[in-house]
Image (spheres, rainbow, N blue to C red):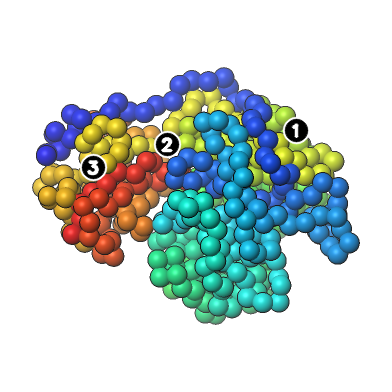
Amino acid sequence: MSVRAIVGILLAALSGSAQSLGTFSLTGSMITSRFSHTATLLPDGKVLIAGSYITSTGGHFGSDGYFACQPGDPCVRATDSELYGPATRTFSRAGSMNMIQPTGGVLLSTGKVLFAESYPTGALAKIVVYDPASGEFKDAGTTATLGYVASAALLNDGRVLLLGAGQAEIYDPIAESFSPVPNFRTSLSSVTALAVLLDGRVLLVPDLPALFNPADATLTQIPFPFWFDDNPSGTLLPDGKVLLAGGVNDAGTVNSAELFDGSLSMTGSMTSSRFGHSANLLPNGSVLVAGGVSTASAEIYDPVAGGFSLTGSMAMPRYYHGSVLLNNGQVLITGGMDGSFVATSSAELYTPATLISAPALFSISRDGQNQGAIWHAATGQIASPDNPASPGEALSMYTVNLLPGGLIPPRVVIGGGFGEILYFGPAPGYPGYYQVNFRLPSGVAPGSAIPVRLTYLGRPSKAVSIGAQ
């Protein structure tokens, strides 16, 4: 089948319908009150809520401003999890993890979710993965050197950067191996990965801004102005810059924001000071910033105008809550601590002005399933069981709902690994469609129905299949 025939079977571009401007509405409540938890969008569109702290009456804030569960405090660290179903807007119980204070919630190329132990037990940190297919958590070993993992980040090649106290390791989910990063600067402690840049480097804070390059395992400090604040949120923008918003300094919480583009520069200030807030890149390229200590307000950052403007407010103040962009374009906000610094189980949905659905892949059967409308770039023929793709070969496909002009590439997951992106942009001659050219990884096992999925801005499409040899 040729490219011309493929275009003829494509579904109309999936576009969202207009909704009321920037509103929050309550959805079903979580089973457990929790904060500092993770919220991970799964390939099937559900959200895995897992880990961190739960409390009803206990715990306290230390002198450093962080919530602490100390001996004698009536609070515990959650190891259980739950699933949010967007179709029913309800939460249901999922499995439990065999670790203390899990962190991470990193969706791997395999479709599984990685969690790491962030509480120092005196032993090496445990790693656990959640398998959506079985609904179970399974032990994935321990780190090679880390006593705990403060932060985890998915690298552009599918590996995971694990950061501890003055040490770092890289986890390979395909080989299931841990590799310590040599010469990682030991003076860094409690390091947080704020964003993975387009070139693969990782922006680290809060002790001091630094860039880690996984290609050569180098760590480079970034010169920063005197006004740089601790613990900001970090959001990779469509143009490749990173928005750093809010945080704290010696005077308290701040409303300032900066842009990182090789160096730090000021951008417009938020309407409110925020710390412990959330920041989500929306499908239209703007950023939703919500909550923080003792505030229910939310605002939108416009990268073009370089400023913030208020949007609707949440039903209650939230601090250290969870947030995740859903496939339908809404943002799910879960838990956090309320205005009285008590954990809550409530959850709500943010509905932007226009809902933009997740990208979709097309299939020969026209239902977005089974044999994909994915073709050999050299011949224009479908990569089918009778005409399979070869390792290293360039393939092409169409999708919808990418951000016009955006520089953040989609990720193509093929048989559990990432395909190298060769090109993504408007499909020539077909307005509203986008073309993605990618390379079939050499490690993909041959088969007649190799699953292919496209993920963009954290949202996965349904899987289609190709033939590979």
Where disc 1 sits, the SS reads: loop
Q: CA distance from mark 2 to mark 3?
A: 20 Å
Badge 3: how crowded within 10 Å, few (<14), some, or many (20+)?
Answer: many
Q: Amino acid at mark 2?
A: Ala
Between residues 201 and 335, which one lies in front from this camera angle? 335
Q: CA distance from mark 3 to mark 1?
A: 46 Å
Classify residue 44 as left or right of residue 268.
left
Q: How many marks?
A: 3
* Rendering quarter of residue 8: top left
Between residues 51 and 172, which one lies in front from this camera angle? 51
Residue under label 1 = 316
Can residue 166 be seen here?
Answer: no
Q: Amino acid at mark 3?
A: Gln
Can residue 253 be seen here?
Answer: yes
Q: Is residue 18 above or below residue 321?
A: above
| Marking on residue 206 | none
Q: Amino acid at mark 1?
A: Met
Q: Is residue 167 above or below residue 17?
A: below
Mark before the other along the chain sequence, 2 or 1? 1
Residue 96 position in % (x across, y down): 62, 56
Q: Is residue 13 above or below residue 274?
A: above
At a point 28% along the width and 28% down the height, the residue shown is: 11
Answer yes or no: do the residues labelled 2 and 3 have beta carbons within 8 Å?
no
Mark before the other along the chain sequence, 3 or 1? 1
